Image (spheres, coloured by chain):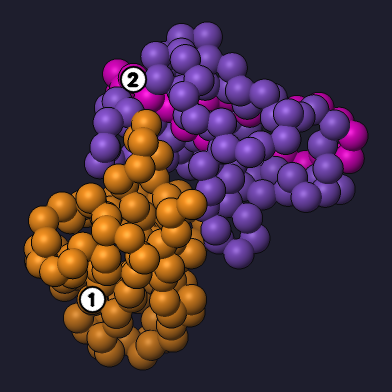
Chain colours: A orange, B purple
Amino acid sequence: GQQVMQIPQYQHVQEGEDFTTYCNSSTTLSNIQWYKQRPGGHPVFLIQLVKSGEVKKQKRLTFQFGEAKKNSSLHITATQTTDVGTYFCADGGTSYGKLTFGQGTILTVHP
Amino acid sequence: DTAVSQTPKYLVTQMGNDKSIKCEQNLGHDTMYWYKQDSKKFLKIMFSYNNKELIINETVPNRFSPKSPDKAHLNLHINSLELGDSAVYFCASSQDSGLGNTIYFGEGSWLTVV
């Protein structure tokens, strides 16, 4: 079935450093969603990308959808300790509202 | 007001027992889900209901039986619990079952089977 591969699995950064997580699919995605899960919390929707080459920004977060719509990335500029958590990409293009999640990237930010 | 609420939040039980997790959403959404998150944080869909009708059943053992009495509720009953059932179970909802819907998750139910 459709798989979405996400790397890296873990990322440790010093506060103030940048962070990027990547999501790749072997097939074209109709749309991709990003979620953040704080430690002990639940996944919370961040953004959805639909168009080829789309770039969206939320403050220090930049989301990109590849030209071929087979990959996506989330970049955080100047990380803060509040950015800790697991970031998931999800293929939102399968049937019946089903989201297929990537494995997630666990981000740790050292003060 | 919590949009998607599930109870209990924590559940510790012995192997072989039967347990239920309840979920309610007050968003007026048509579609509800159960997701399982394992110890490696992997999130996988188990079931989806649209207006009380089962639309997704993802290769889940038949010890797991969802029930949706109305579109605002989706409960999960688990029979004969096994050690491998230990996980976090998230209830979720979306406006409908169309493509690209945002999913709203409940706070999770931490199930530990001993």
Image quarter of residue A96: top left
Please, which chain is the residue tagged with disc 2 on? Answer: B
Q: Residues within 10 Å of mark 2 (few under 14, many from 20)?
A: some
Residue shown at 63%/32% (left/top)?
A: B8
Query: Looking at numbered disc 1 in the image, what kind of residue is underneath it?
Result: His
Image quarter of residue B4: top left
Q: Residues within 10 Å of mark 1 (few under 14, many from 20)?
A: some
Coordinates of residue B100 in the picture (x, y in percent): 25, 41
Coordinates of residue B2 in the picture (x, y in percent): 38, 31
- Give the mark count: 2
Give the magenta-colored segment's residue range.
Answer: B11-34
- In the displayed image of the protein, which residue is found farthest to the top? B69
What residue sits right under mark 1 in the picture?
A75
Image quarter of residue B102: top left
Q: Nearer the viewer, residue B71 or A50?
A: A50
Q: Which of A78 and A3 is in front in this view?
A: A3
Residue shown at 58%/45% (left/top)?
A: B36
